[in-house]
Each structure stands twice: as C-alpha cells, then as structure tokens.
Image (cartoon, grey):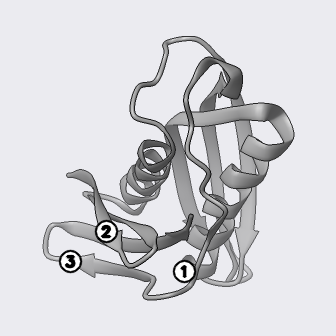
C-alpha cells in the first residue's frame, strides 16, 4: 500500500492505496509531496490541519487543496502526512491531519498549481481503499 505517480498529459496524477480511509488520504498527500520534490530533508516542524466537507470525495479534494495552500502561505513543503478521516453525526466528513513542513528554500521543488476533480476516484476495494487524483502542474 502507498502511492505511485502517474503521467497524465500535461499534469501529474497520484494513484494511492491504503488499508483504511485514513491511510489512503495520507498516501495521496505523500504522493503530492513526491510530485513536488524528489529529495526531502529531515528538518521542519509539524503543523495541524482540520478540514470539513459534505462528502468523502470533496473532503479529499479540500484536504489536498489545503496542503497546497499551506505550502504557499507557510513557504513549506508538507511531508510525512498523517490523517484521521471520519463522518460526523450531521452527515459531513472531517479530516484531522498533520504534516511536517520542510522549508521550500531547503528543497528544489516543482510547482503543483492545484488539485483537480478531473478523473478523481475514491473507492473501497477488497483490500481497503484506492484513490486517483490529478494535479495541475
């Protein structure tokens, strides 16, 4: 279980699997980091994220979008993702997550502009969960 980068016309895609929904969210986020940077230093401080959305797919989109936002605002490459995904009592979904922020000045990072809904998939499988996400580069 984990992720693989996939070529996608002018963009890049991440295909990820995980035994749980938490694991597949973390694996897609790790794939996003890999799409931006080949070698990641060991420095950086952890930070927390709290994302809410109306369904699982929207939650995955919003979580990844928030990571790109944090990259831009904090000036860090989010890596080593941990995510806890849950459905709330009112039918919405939450993702409580954390990541280690590596200073962008310490890495040679490629620009990933945005997450897209193009071909996005988030589905249960016999082995757990599978996600496929295309990023605009």
Nearest the eye: 15 or 21:
15
User: Mark 2 to mark 3: distance in Å?
Assistant: 23 Å
How many numbered discs?
3
Left or right relative to 125: residue 47: right
**Mark 1 or mark 2: which is in front?**
2
* Above/below status of 111 relative to 9: above
What residue does disc 1 label?
57
What residue does disc 3 label?
125
Residue 93 location in percent, x, y? 65, 72
User: Mark 1 to mark 3: distance in Å?
Assistant: 15 Å
Residue 62 lies in what quarter of the image? bottom right
Label 1 Cα neighbours within 10 Å, binned few <14 / some 14-19 / many ≥20: some
* Above/below status of 41 relative to 135: above
Residue 55 location in percent, x, y? 61, 83
Left or right relative to 74: residue 136: left
Residue 101 lies in what quarter of the image? top right
What residue does disc 2 label?
7
* Above/below status of 78 relative to 44: below
Nearest the eye: 13 or 59:
13
């Amino acid at each position: 279980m984990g992720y693989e980068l996939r070529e996608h016309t002018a963009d890049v895609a991440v295909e990820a699997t995980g035994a749980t929904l938490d694991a597949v969210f973390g694996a897609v986020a790790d794939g996003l980091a890999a799409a931006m940077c080949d070698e990641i230093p060991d420095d950086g401080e952890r930070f927390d994220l709290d994302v809410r959305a109306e369904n699982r797919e929207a939650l995955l989109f919003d979580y990844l979008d928030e990571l790109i936002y944090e990259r831009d605002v904090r000036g860090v490459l989010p890596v080593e993702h941990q995510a806890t995904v849950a459905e709330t009592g009112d039918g919405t979904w939450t993702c409580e997550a954390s990541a280690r922020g590596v200073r962008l000045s310490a890495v040679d990072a490629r620009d990933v502009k945005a997450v897209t809904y193009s071909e996005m998939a988030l589905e249960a499988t016999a082995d757990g969960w599978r996600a496929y996400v295309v990023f605009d580069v």
